[in-house]
């Protein structure tokens, strides 16, 4: 599954096994085949993800943003916390 994080300061692209997002309505875990949706991310929350073929999750803190989820990808448009 592909994860893209787009911010004004940088752009990240990863191949991942799963991603956990904190949305304004609760936390969700996205895996390949997830139902397509668009969600608003909870302010000042972490985006956690497991890179393909890794054992420990990675994360990034964002100030605000949205996520566009398809069955094969996640695109996050966000502002990053300092």
Image (cartoon, helix red, strand yellow):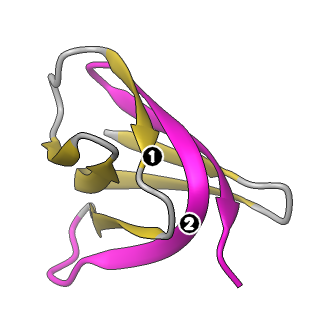
Magenta segment: does it hold 56?
A: yes
Taking 55 as reference, is 51 left or right? right
Q: Position of residue 57 (x, y in %)?
A: 24, 77
Q: Which residue is mark 1?
A: 3
Specify the principal SS of the magenta part. Answer: strand
Closer to the camera in the image, 51 or 66: 66
Residue 15 image label: none
The numbered dot on residue 62 is 2
Q: Is residue 63 above or below residue 34?
A: below
Quadrant of image for the C terminus: bottom right
Q: In the structure shown, which secondary structural element does the residue marked by tag 2 occupy?
A: strand
For mark 1, give the secondary structure.
strand
How crowded is the residue under tag 1: few (<14 C-alpha within 10 Å), some, or many (20+)? many
Residue 79 lies, with reference to residue 23, above or below; the image says below
Q: Residue at x 21, y 68 (%)?
A: 53
Task: Give the percent coordinates (x, y) of residue 66.
Answer: 53, 37
Q: Which residues are magenta?
A: 53-82
Point out the residue furthest to the right here: 8
Name the residue: 39% across, 75% down.
59
Residue 22 position in % (x across, y down): 29, 55
Q: Residue at x 18, y 32 (%)?
A: 32
């Amino acid at each position: 599954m592909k994860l893209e994080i787009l911010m004004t300061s940088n752009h990240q692209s990863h191949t991942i096994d799963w991603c956990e997002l904190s949305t304004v309505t609760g936390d969700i875990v996205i895996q390949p085949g997830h139902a397509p949706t668009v969600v608003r991310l909870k302010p000042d929350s972490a985006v956690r993800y497991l890179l393909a073929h890794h054992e420990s999750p990675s994360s990034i803190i964002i100030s605000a943003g949205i996520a566009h989820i398809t069955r094969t990808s996640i695109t996050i448009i966000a502002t990053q916390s300092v």
